[in-house]
Amino acid sequence: MLQYTMRRILQLIPVLLGMTFIVFMMIRLIPGNPAQVILGQQATKEAVEALTRELGLNHPWYVQFFDYIKGIFQGDLGSSLRTRTPVTEEIWPYLAATLELSVVAMIIAIFVGVNAGIISAWFQNSWFDYLAMILALLGVSIPIFWLGLMEQWTFAINLHWLPTTGRENIRDPIEAITNLYLIDTLLQGRFDQFVEVIKHLILPGLALATIPMAIIARMTRSSMLEVMRSDFIRTARAKGMKMFWVVYKHSLKNAVIPVLTVIGLQMGLLLGGAILTETIFGWPGIGRYIYDAIGFRDYPVIQSGILIVAFIFVMINLIVDLVYAAVDPRIKYN
Amino acid sequence: MGSALAGCSSKSSNGNSSKGGESAQDTLIFGRGGDSVGLDPAAVTDGESFKVTKNIFETLVEFGRQDTEIHEGLATKWDVSPDGLTYTFDLREGVKFQDGTDFNADAVVYNFNRWMNGDADKFPYYASMFGGYKGDEGHVIADVKALDKYKVQFTLKRPQAPFLKNLAMSPFAIASPAAIDKYGDKFTENPVGTGPFKFVSWSRNDKVVIEKNKDYWKKGYPKLNKVIFKSIPENSARLNALKNGEIDLADGINPSDADGIKADSNLQLFERPSMNVGYLGFTVTRKPFDNVKVRQALNMAIDRQAIIDAFFGGKGVPAKNPMPPVIGGYDDDIQPYEFNLDKAKQLLAEAGYPDGFEMELWAMPVPRPYMPDGKKIAEAIQSNFAKIGVKAKIVSYEWATYLEKASKGEADAYLLGWTGDNGDADNFLYALLDKDSIGSNNYSYYSNDKLHDILIKAQSEVDEGKRNELYKQAQEIIHEDAPWAPLAHSTPLLAGSAKLKGFYPHPTGSDWLDEASFE
């Protein structure tokens, strides 16, 4: 197991390096000079040339790439071309905002998705099953953009239950410590702000959770159905075991492997896919950080931002693989 | 940082403060589409940055509340020598920077020396407005010196007609020399000026907080205690936040939302005085757009009023010149190209294209105040052109790509626009259509020597009447040559809480908030 873990971690290095190279080349293939974009339409030719030199964009691409890789190994992810601030200094608040949102979305998705899947499987072909699966089908097909605006329109504009944008009550700003506001407000004993943070998390959390929730529900349902048809479950039921225990102890444990895979994948996708949700809900997260950077051709921010997201993605996959072994002793790593 | 804020905010979680039992809101939340790039106004070029710095810093002379007339600012009086080469300013006494240091003639000299000793990378706007940096041939300012504590004198190498208007622009606001020395490169994150609000904090991509400058020289101002600029990129989401009371003011309102806002008793609609032009540019170096008759024919084939009604929500006027009517020197005598398909066809035939031709029509991918929906407008023009046999294929690219390719002259015809910087005709006509501007903002590659001579002459003509006459001549030439089809001068919209008063949207796009307050 330890050997397997080490091997998997070592395998990550070429993967990340290769990805860095691909992203590096790809963003340089997009037309548009960062200096021109940063200075805007109004800028003079001289100003654009001066900024291009200053940013080192006049060097050949391989020199820029080599400098970048050298920097990474020294813990330097480069500086934003636009704000001139090191990415490592800038990125944490955005990452924290996205992490907080993604974790909440994932909790909603797993809790609702797994339980809806179980209940659907147990009451197969009931009205609940049909309703849940129709909702799940809608869930994967609804554009987040539209859903987000509908949520705002319903719960914020008309019912006034929840806020539409941001992470906090703007009139009562939160003092950042860790930048994870749920934790920060508790550390400061500001329960009123804590409640505000939760209120702000609900709508974007739901929007972001919709797709994984639907996928998890469908996966759980089919996986559970398969397990429940197996002999040992029939035996358990024949022995007169309570339904609740059959489901949550025996069946779920055996149905969980494919569900875990889906959850792992969805968590990775969530990080990358948060852009739309973050845009609609004015959420200052990493998705918007990278998206804005693309608009400004802010190369270091784009490549380092994607690198970090990719790193988290592969780490989650690694953890999921390791968790398999923990829940299912049949899986062996040699 | 921020602990003091958090401490007192627990008592007033909605930004209200109680005064003698009745509560009045004293925090304004301004929702906008993007974040500032930097808060040192001399070092940035984007409108979102100036929106904030306009309230932290002040300039020697200032624009009017809602126009670009020149008024006193940090200078109370100025004399211009008859040859237009010497400007002497009397400065306001008793003004302090927000860090407690004195504002005086030395501070003015310090700021100008800082800019002119810089370069295009550090202070990109300076060269565009003053012809270069120290040592450059085109640099207008020969010298800036303090005559006494509150008197400062500028000596110019040649007269520059828009000089005062340039001085009133946000990038040339006077910053605290002590703070510049103290913060160095980080001044852009720690701005200190003499304005009504002082900087508190900035979380990138999220919000900028400024609060009342208690020592502000204008007694009784600002009325608000705090202003928070909050970025909400999506237009509909921003309007939703306004409707839900999370923000008090929102810019970038879609024209199509105007009626809904007017009907809502909790909201009010603000119209920003128009200082822009949206146009369809022809790249005159490409065939068949090198033929003036073709360009004139296309001008006649566009139904401008229909486009404004459909896509500007009626909030705009049809354009006949490359600059809006509010700009001094606007030629109202120009007869616009009438919408006349028969005449257009006839002109095309004269040009040798009786059956029309095929072309690419470039549509802007992003909404701008001067072009609310590039794609739809392109489609309208496409169907207009089809009626005279011109088959236009609509093409679009991502914004930065669009600008780069268009600037290289790769488009047959492209939609674009311009919002004025300083309210001067030179900032439209010379910046956009002079042959000197090919390679920067003259994307049409239009070059006319006669026009060039007139525009250069106008740059140093200090007599306002004579200068306006020159610009009228320039507009006639441009009208005849038709390098563009000017489309519209739009009225950008903002919406705010019905309780907000004393807010006056400025044509430059950055607004003073010192008079704003809530009922």
Image (cartoon, rainbow, N blue to C red):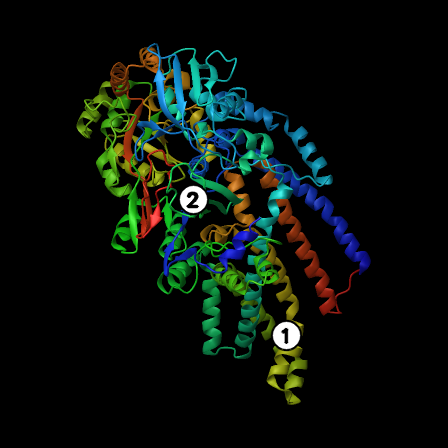
Q: Where is residue B175 in the image (x, y as percent from the top left)?
A: 49, 30
Which quadrant of the structure image shows residue B89? top left
Query: Callout 2: helix, strand or loop?
Result: loop
Q: Is residue B405 toward the left or the right of residue B297 in the image?
A: right
Q: Is residue A234 toward the left or the right of residue A45 in the image?
A: right
Q: Position of residue B237 (x, y in %)?
A: 40, 52
Viewer-proximal residue among B182 and A276: B182
Report in which chain the residue with disc 2 lies: B
Marks 2 and 1, how far apart in space? 47 Å
Which quadrant of the structure image shows residue A156? bottom left
Query: Callout 1: helix, strand or loop?
Result: helix
Q: Is residue A301 toward the left or the right of residue A202 in the image?
A: right
Q: Which mark is residue B342?
A: none
Label total for image = 2
Viewer-proximal residue among B472 and A270: B472
Q: Which mark is residue B33?
A: 2
Amino acid type of the residue tagged 2 in the rendering: Gly
From what the image shows, is residue A104 above or below residue B353? below
Report in which chain the residue with disc 1 lies: A
**Of tags 2 and 1, which is closer to the observer?**
2
Q: Where is residue A205 in the image (x, y as percent from the top left)?
A: 51, 60
Viewer-proximal residue among B23 and B302: B23
Query: Which residue was labeled with disc 1?
Result: A252
